[in-house]
Image (spheres, grey):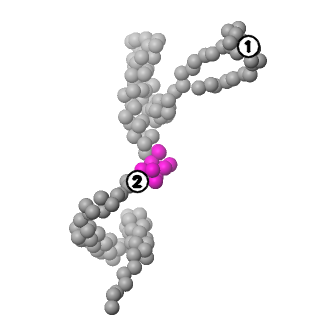
Amino acid sequence: MIIEEELLDPSHFWDKRYVKITTEQIMSELDETVLRYFEREINAWMAEFLEHDRDAENRYFRKLLKEYYPQARRILRDQYRDLYPRAWKKKFTMDDLKKVSWDGMAEDVSKRIHLLGSLSLVAEGTPLMDKIVEDLILPNLRLLAEFCENVEIKEEP
């Protein structure tokens, strides 16, 4: 990665007196995530370690960072899922449709619709029930209405 570049006359490109190439180590996004979310814990571990030892080459620090990598990967994955939700959806094929148990699905969906209906009948004015209605019942009713709108049943004479 080129961080800074100054244009030289072409005659100086290969002259070592004019060209200085340095290599810088850049932190990865994974390391940045570890430090962003777990900095206090890492600082506490490092302070405890440095009371008795020296870490001139940052070996212990690197080891601590690597211990937090699985958690940081989960955080990054969740962030990318939020940013790119369609990329994470499962793609269904025609073979998947052949494997579906339509009778079992119809029974299961019917039970869940009945449960939503009975839950909406007992919905009181409590904050918990308002939250259930807002977060569970209304979004699912919208989905059901959209489904019913897209699938028309016409009776054959």
Q: Is residue 64 above or below residue 13?
A: below
- The mark closer to the camera, 1 or 2, is 1
Q: Tell me the residue at 44%/13% (across/down).
A: 55
Which quarter shows the C terminus? Answer: bottom left
Judging by the rendered image, the residue that carries numbered circle 2 is 89
Residue farthest along the right direction in this orientation: 9
Q: Which mark is residue 98?
A: none
Compare marks 1 and 2 and give the one earlier in the sequence: 1
Category of crowding for the residue at label 1, using alpha-carbon neighbours closer than 10 angstroms: few (below 14), some (14–19), many (at least 20): few
- Magenta highlight: main SS: helix
Judge from the rendering whether residue 21 lies leftward or rightward of residue 113; answer left or right: right
Judging by the rendered image, the residue that carries numbered circle 1 is 12
Q: Secondary structure at mark 2?
A: loop
Q: Tell me the residue at 39%/22% (across/down).
A: 63
Q: Is residue 154 above or below residue 132?
A: below
Look at the image and give the residue range highlighted in magenta: 79-89
Residue 16, position as x, y percentages in the image: 68, 9
Is residue 66 inside the magenta stretch?
A: no
Quadrant location of residue 150? bottom left
> What amino acid type should be assigned to the residue bearing mark 2?
Lys
Q: Secondary structure at mark 1?
A: helix
> What amino acid type should be assigned to the residue bearing mark 1?
His
| Residue 108 visible in this rendered orientation of the protein | no
Q: Tell me the residue at 74%/18% (across/down).
A: 10
Q: Nearer the viewer, residue 140 or 109?
A: 109
